[in-house]
Amino acid sequence: MYELHDSQKFMYFADRQGAGQALLLCGSITIPHKTEIEKMQEAANQVFCLNNGLRTYFIEKDGTVYQDIRPYEKKEFEVLKFESKEELDAFGKVYATIPLQLDIRSEGKKSANKEKASRPSATLIKNVLVHNTKMFFTKMRMGMLKRDKGCCELMLFELPEANGVIIKMHHIVSDAWTMMLLANQFISILNGNTVEAFDYQEFVENEKKYYLSKRYERDSEYMKEQLSRCPEATWIWPEPYTSLEASRDTVVLDKDTTSAINKYCETNGLTPYVVFLTAVCIYINRKINRETFYIGSVALNRSNYREKNTAGIFVSSVPVLMELDVEDSFAETLNKVKDKSLGAFRHQKGVAKNKDSKKMLYDIWISYQNATLDADASVDCTQYYCNYSIDTTIFSIEDRSMEGQFKLHFDHNCKVPKEDVDELFATVISILKNGINDDTVKIKDL
């Protein structure tokens, strides 16, 4: 039994406040041939046996929330039948919006929420109640009013000429890498291969040691200095939100543009993440007419073999202070953004000690996802968005090198106007194309 770490504490608080739908990760894995259901049942059980984080439950005890692991018990997973992939995806899109119910047990004094929630507007309360009523009937229609409690739910499915699995996880024990890790494990086990998985608590114990180290003190000082240099928060869409409903917009870059970006990165010793981050920062500079601002960046925090093969939440959001100069060239700006992001990642864990880091310093994050399904390239992986969000937006780059195209997703609360979404994509893509075509041009002239 061990305490929640910082990112988990916020997620637990948000879930208890009724925002659990915003913390879901869901996707399907379709195997393009028929597979025996018995083998799939066995593979699914092995995944749950190997990854103890999937069996996490929570204990509220003496004013503190802890987490512990349920013993593994073999399970018979539900098998769904669909007539087509389109029917499967239609189900997945709705299923991904139905919150998981955490397994919470109370012992002794009930825990007190240390997080503070601002008083919601009457309009927001009304819209949330309307949404919850609709969700009740959605769950009733899909036969999901009574589901097992837990952080992870898995169901098998059959298509006329294919089989697969749908996985839904709570973000409090999972990240996008974990979803792909489970997919790789499931397929590998089906193919008769041995897979390795490690205990998430080992990572937690190492984190505890870090917070007692001199390195933590140095990281805290760095982040404190960064957070003091720009007292003004970066809000691109500052209007209050009146609903938690959200949507995902997606643009797929053509293969020629993707190839040009990759070639430019290879030639200049850069990663696609830095190039996209730079383009988004130039967009922010123009949108709010400021050269100094914050942007949130998602850090993967999986630096070695054990961490890359451990199911759990490793990602953290890092406030990155950007200081652009519109007279700089695209190439000069790239190097500045690279240095800023590397510095923030190097000292990212120092934010925990700074009160300013608890404030909402920005409303846009950028995330780069390059996890791949190495176990079988013929398997189709489909993500389903939860359609719920608090007052944040996420611009994510999905890098699937085997497909030869970047997918750009923008997840946002519905308060963000459609014209702003279109403007964001158009600006970022235009800056990318023009910048890599001639990186000597000043960013104000791109």
Image (cartoon, grey):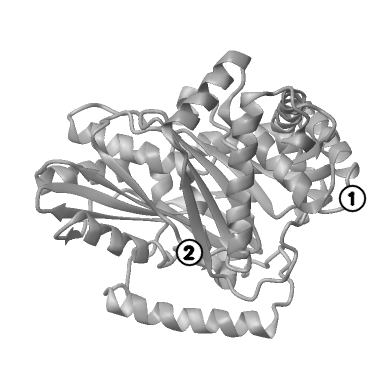
| Figure quadrant of the C terminus | top right
Residue at left offset 40%, top offset 43% = 179
**Image coordinates for residue 346, horizontal then vertical, percent:** 71, 28
- 357 to the left or right of 10: right
**Image coordinates for residue 304, horizontal then vertical, percent:** 51, 23
Residue at left offset 66%, top offset 71% = 241
Residue at left offset 23%, top offset 45% = 30
- 333 to the left or right of 30: right
Looking at the picture, does residue 387 appear above or below residue 180?
A: below
How many marks the image carries: the answer is 2
Q: Earlier in the sequence, mark 1 or mark 2?
A: 1
Q: Check contact, mark 1 vs mark 2: CB within 8 A.
A: no
Task: State the image quarter where residue 330 is shown.
Answer: top right
Q: Secondary structure at mark 2?
A: loop
Mark linked to residue 231: 1
Instruction: Pick whichever, 258 or 61, lies toward us.
Output: 258
**Image coordinates for residue 131, horizontal then vertical, percent:** 49, 79
Instruction: Pick whichever, 346 or 445, lies toward us.
Output: 445
Q: Secondary structure at mark 1?
A: loop
User: Can residue 375 be seen by looking at this rendering?
Assistant: yes
Q: Amino acid at mark 2?
A: Asn
Task: State the image quarter where residue 279 is shown.
Answer: top right
Mark 1 crowd level (few <14, some 14–19, many ≥20, 10 Å Cα): few
Instruction: Pick whichever, 225 or 365, lies toward us.
Output: 365
Looking at the picture, does residue 431 appear above or below residue 76?
A: above
Mark linked to residue 279: none
Q: Which residue is mark 2?
A: 387
**Image coordinates for residue 333, horizontal then vertical, percent:** 76, 28
Q: Amino acid at mark 1?
A: Pro
Residue at left offset 57%, top offset 81% = 127
Real-space Cα separation, disc 1 to disc 2, in angstroms? 32 Å
